């Protein structure tokens, strides 16, 4: 299982902060997870639309869509950061 | 010595500076940046701001920024304190303090750390205005500030 986390604007739009997801295959990437989430339609499709800037971290390191994801990983999605 | 703290309670700028400057007689300069909550943003009154973060990743991201600053400059100590939770205008939000033998390193490293924090540390601000709540959008000028350091290289 993969642990998914959502923060800030995304968490509110999706009305959840976390969930677990069954990876579709052993060689999953962030991109395939995003496709899986988009396929849910509705607000999921809107939040992960091509024109939306969503940042991603795998095991708490920022990465891009090509990053590999394996069983037990923590994948977090969030909007551009605004701290400081 | 370096120290990173994420906390809900306020921090005491003077106490942190004092503790820092006294730890090593080789320190000749302490530069601090204090970010505080404004009562106005994008022309609208802001009554409260709530800061959210990603526990675990936030500390790691800040540590990576502090490590990079230590690689780029000769420094004698770094403190980063960032608050989360609800804040009121005038409340301190973030403190970056850097100690070095001479002022140049401390000035540059302090600006580098806050610039990178703005674009790389997972914090998000939500403002409460008389018209309701809204998430603060990332600023293009913050990206430009980060790019400047990338061009400067290591």
Image (tube, coloured by chain):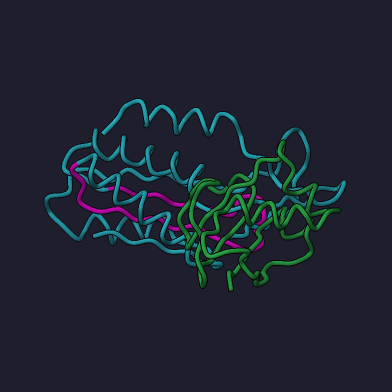
> Does B55 sit above or below residue B49?
below
Q: Main secondary structure of the magenta part?
A: strand
**At x 37% / y 31%, what residue is drawn?**
B149
Say which quarter of the image contains residue B141: top right
Q: Quadrant of the N terminus of chain B?
A: bottom left
- For the residue pair B131 and A62, the one nearer the viewer reads as A62
Q: Quadrant of the C terminus of chain B?
A: top left
**At x 58% / y 64%, what residue is drawn?**
A25
Say which quarter of the image contains residue A16: bottom right
- x, y percent for residue A17: 69, 67
Task: Give the magenta part as a residue range.
Answer: B74-98
> Does B137 sit above or below residue B86?
above
**Is A82 covered by the magenta stretch?**
no
**Is B81 covered by the magenta stretch?**
yes
Along the horizontal axis of the image, is B124 left or right of B130? left
**At x 64% / y 70%, what residue is drawn?**
A22
**At x 36% / y 49%, what residue is drawn?**
B65
The hue used for chain A is: green
- For the residue pair B60 and B89, the one nearer the viewer reads as B60
User: Judging from the image, what is the letter of the chain drawn in cyan?
Assistant: B
């Amino acid at each position: 299982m993969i642990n998914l986390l959502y923060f800030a604007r995304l968490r509110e739009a999706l009305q959840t902060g976390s969930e677990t997801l069954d990876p579709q295959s052993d060689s999953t990437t962030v991109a395939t997870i995003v496709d899986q989430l988009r396929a849910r339609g509705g607000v999921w499709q809107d939040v992960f639309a091509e024109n939306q800037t969503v940042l991603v971290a795998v095991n708490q390191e920022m990465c891009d869509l090509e990053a590999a994801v394996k069983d037990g990983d923590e994948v977090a999605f969030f909007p551009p950061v605004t701290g400081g | 010595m370096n120290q990173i703290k994420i906390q809900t309670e306020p921090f005491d700028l003077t106490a942190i500076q004092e503790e820092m400057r006294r730890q090593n007689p080789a320190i000749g300069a302490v530069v601090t940046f204090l970010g505080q909550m404004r009562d106005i943003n994008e022309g609208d009154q802001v009554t409260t701001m709530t800061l959210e973060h990603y526990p675990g990743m936030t500390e790691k991201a800040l540590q990576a920024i502090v490590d990079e600053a230590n690689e780029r400059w000769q420094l004698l100590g770094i403190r980063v304190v960032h608050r989360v939770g609800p804040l009121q205008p005038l409340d301190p939000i973030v403190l970056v303090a850097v100690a070095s033998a001479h002022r140049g390193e401390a000035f540059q490293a302090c600006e580098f750390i806050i610039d990178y924090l703005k674009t790389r540390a997972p914090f998000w601000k939500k403002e409460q205005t008389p018209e309701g709540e809204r998430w603060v959008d990332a600023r293009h000028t913050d990206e430009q500030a980060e790019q400047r350091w990338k061009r400067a290289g290591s």
